[in-house]
Amino acid sequence: MTLSLKRSKLSVAILLFGIGMTASIHAQEIAVLKYKGGGDWYGNPTSLPNLISYCNININTKLNPQPQTVEPDSPDIYQYPLVHMTGHGNVFFSENDAENLRNYLISGGFLHIDDNYGMEPYLVKELKKVFPNKELIELPKTHPIFSAAFKFPEGLPKIHEHDGKRPQAFGMFENDRLVVLFTYESDLGNGWEDEEVYNDPFEVREKALKMGANIVKYVFEN
């Protein structure tokens, strides 16, 4: 065997080892839902990377630092235990979208929907396609998602005021398992953004990140 061939094989081995180590270090992934309808599914671009970093440091997760993007009708959605959805406006699920989302959620997946203000009327209608016989139920303050890692005795925190309504967390359940979480009038995602985006005080951003960490911890442990 020539020296150059030996070096080539060694380089390949090192590359494969590196890939394996990366997969091992980042064993879990979160995805953003790229839905149809014209709503800005891509809103708050720095939110999830910041939340992931916070979780990896503070609650010992091993999340891939870069969130993935997945469409609701894609078979790839089953790779992600947690899918995050946000936006301000219209949402549309096709029949295939709704069926695939339903099967994903029933089989163990979790969908967190954070209303970035203005999404709620469109979302509620489309969720009926996913679960025609289920309703969004407000979670009580005692639900374990509010104390999974950090305690929120008053329930969902208020991050941005908008029209001053109280923050609410709604859920959909499958055999007593929470499969959909809809955070409304809170704007957690805005609180996860880079500091200079909204110039929120540290205390507000930390509150949002702690609640986000609760969601992540709850999902991965239930």
Image (cartoon, rainbow, N blue to C red):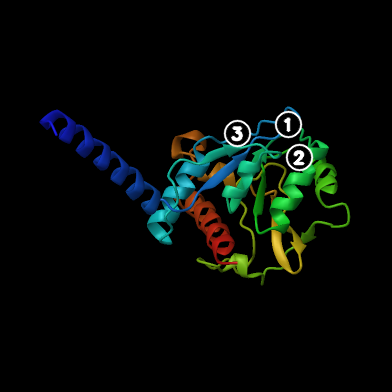
- Which of the 4 quarters of the picture holds residue 176? bottom right
Q: Is label 2 or label 1 in front?
A: 2
Where disc 2 sits, the SS reads helix
Residue sitting farthest toward the bottom: 142
Nearer-N-terminus badge (2/3): 3
In the picture, the disc for residue 125 is none
Q: Can residue 38 be seen in this view?
A: yes
Residue sitting farthest toward the right: 133
The residue shown at (76%, 35%) is: 91
Residue highlighted by disc 1: 36
Q: Is residue 178 left or right of residue 1?
A: right
In the picture, the disc for residue 43 is 3
Counting from the top left corner in percent of width and height, residue 4 is at: 14, 29
The kind of residue tagged 3 is Gly
Q: Nearer the viewer, residue 4 or 90?
A: 4
The kind of residue tagged 1 is Lys
Where, quadrant-wise, is the N terminus in this rendering?
A: top left
Counting from the top left corner in percent of width and height, residue 60 is at: 40, 61
The answer to whether mark 2 and mark 1 are in CB contact below 8 A is: yes
The residue shown at (55%, 61%) is: 220
Residue highlighted by disc 2: 97
Q: Is residue 181 visible?
A: no
- Which of the 4 quarters of the picture holds residue 55? bottom left
The residue shown at (66%, 72%) is: 142
Nearer-N-terminus badge (2/1): 1
Q: Which of 35 and 169 is in front in this view?
A: 35
Q: How far apart are marks 2 and 3 (CA)?
A: 20 Å
Counting from the top left corner in percent of width and height, residue 215 is at: 58, 58
